Image (tube, helix red, strand yellow):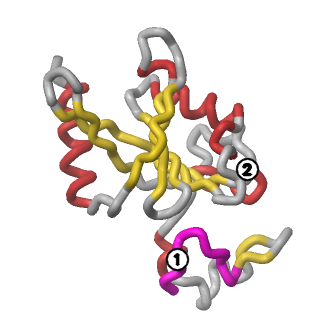
Amino acid sequence: MKKAAGVACQFQKFHKGCVVHHTRRMPFECGVWNCRWLVNDDAAELSRPDRAHYVIDLMPDFVTITDGETDEKQNIQVVQIWVDPKYPDAHRDPALRRWLYRRAQDGIAALIRFNERDAITAFAPPFDAKGAWHEISGASTARTHSFAEIEHALRGRARAIVEP
């Protein structure tokens, strides 16, 4: 299908959802992709994506931050949230913020994507000693990470959590 990000899906119908879901006409990309709301892993409190104007991607990713004093780089796992560009503040939904807070307790931040390039990184209060939310705007994702890059970055994170 090769639908560009931010372009309405030709199969999405108002008040009906996907009209080709689980049919032969359903694009391959849609068959292998899923959102967290559908699998309901701790997402029951969240509104349906078409009402909330954001979708939480199942595929994890990571961001790399650099310590300003030591120049040391650290990969931080992020959950990707795709926001409808017509509703750029949808990611401030209180239910979503509570969900992100729970992820942050496990060391996971959020990458709020508005399209394939423009994003902000959101760090919930567990990341901050003073308990504040932080949004780093202007984050540009020139490309998405490959599966191998994600696996490598997150495998290193898992070792750091397990090993003291």
Q: Residue at x 66, y 37 (%)?
A: 92
Q: Observer-nearest residue: 5 or 104?
A: 5
Label at residue 70: none
Q: Residue at x 51, y 53 (%)?
A: 113
From what the image shows, is residue 27 above or below residue 57?
A: below
Q: Which residue lies most toward the bottom here?
A: 25
Label at residue 52: 2
Magenta-span inclusion, residue 110: no
Residue 37 percent location from the top left of the image: 63, 51
| Residue tagged 1 | 4
Q: Which residue lies most toward the right here?
A: 15
The magenta-colored residue range is: 1-11
**Which amino acid lies under the numbered mark 1 shown in the image of this protein?**
Ala
Secondary structure under badge 1? loop
Badge 2: residue crowd in 10 Å (few <14, some 14–19, many ≥20): some
Residue 97 percent location from the top left of the image: 62, 32
Quadrant of the drawing holding the C terminus: top left
Q: Main secondary structure of the magenta part?
A: loop
